[in-house]
Amino acid sequence: MQVAHESSSPARGFRAKYEKLLRKSPRTLEIFCALVLIGLAVEFLSEVVFWEWFYFRYHRDYAYTPASRMAEWVYEVCVALLALWMIGMAWNLIRGASRRRDRGLFSPRALRVWGTVFALLPVLILVAAPGAITHFHLLFWCVIAAGACFALAARRAAAPPVDSGIPTPIE
């Protein structure tokens, strides 16, 4: 007679249900996230507009150099591209239909990249400002977000594609 060994770990009851990560999210959550993304994108675009207004209004009062102006332009272009990307993601959420085979917003590769960014962010923050250790909860959230990105990327890569009803082009 063989007895199955059960783990007595306290974490046994808190095991993540990865299938929940692959379920279709509630429509209200998708709309709410889209509105948050649109709000952030509008804020980013208004920052670029305000930055340029400030320059044209007060450029005689400050010692702007071509190098500093070029750095500002690079920053503004990056912020504008980020805002446009956020608007595109929000549009996909509002439509409720993704063009991806698994109906997700991010590919497994993109999730791994974001996971790496979230994993490195606390290290970079602590190197830049060692006093940030007092905000341990924010650093911990970054680590949790990194773990969630890696877990979702692993599940998406292993899951069979979902038939979305969208015809694929003939190769």
Image (cartoon, rainbow, N blue to C red):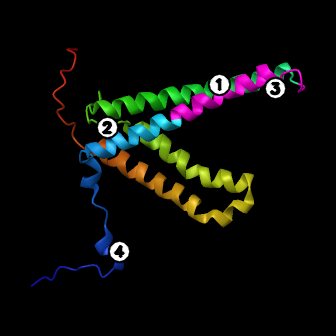
Q: Nearer the viewer, mark 4 or mark 2?
A: 2
**Amino acid type, residue under disc 1 in the picture:** Val
Secondary element at tag 2: loop
Quick one: 89 or 147, which is closer to the camera?
89
Q: Nearer the viewer, mark 2 or mark 1?
A: 1
Between the residue at mark 2 and the residue at mark 1, the CA separation in whole angstroms equals 32 Å
Residue 22 left/right relative to 74: left
Task: Give residue 49's mark.
Answer: 1
Q: Earlier in the sequence, mark 4 or mark 2?
A: 4
Secondary element at tag 4: helix
Is 120 in the magenta?
no
Q: Quadrant of residue 162?
A: top left
Which residue: 88% across, 20% down? 60
Q: Are marks 3 and 2 in contact (CB under 8 Å)?
A: no
Label 3, residues with CA under 10 Å away: few <14, some 14-19, many ≥20: few
Q: Nearer the viewer, mark 4 or mark 3?
A: 3
Residue farthest along the left direction in this orientation: 1
The residue identified by callout 4 is 11
Which residue: 67% across, 53% down? 125
The residue identified by callout 3 is 68
The residue identified by callout 2 is 104
Q: Nearer the viewer, mark 1 or mark 4?
A: 1
Task: Please report the bounds of the magenta region as a residue range.
Answer: 41-63
Relative to 102, is 137 above or below?
below
Secondary element at tag 3: helix
**Amino acid type, residue under disc 3 in the picture:** Ser
Q: Earlier in the sequence, mark 1 or mark 4?
A: 4
Residue 166 left/right relative to 47: left
**Image quarter in which the N terminus is found:** bottom left
Q: Earlier in the sequence, mark 3 or mark 2?
A: 3
Between the residue at mark 3 and the residue at mark 2, the CA separation in whole angstroms equals 40 Å
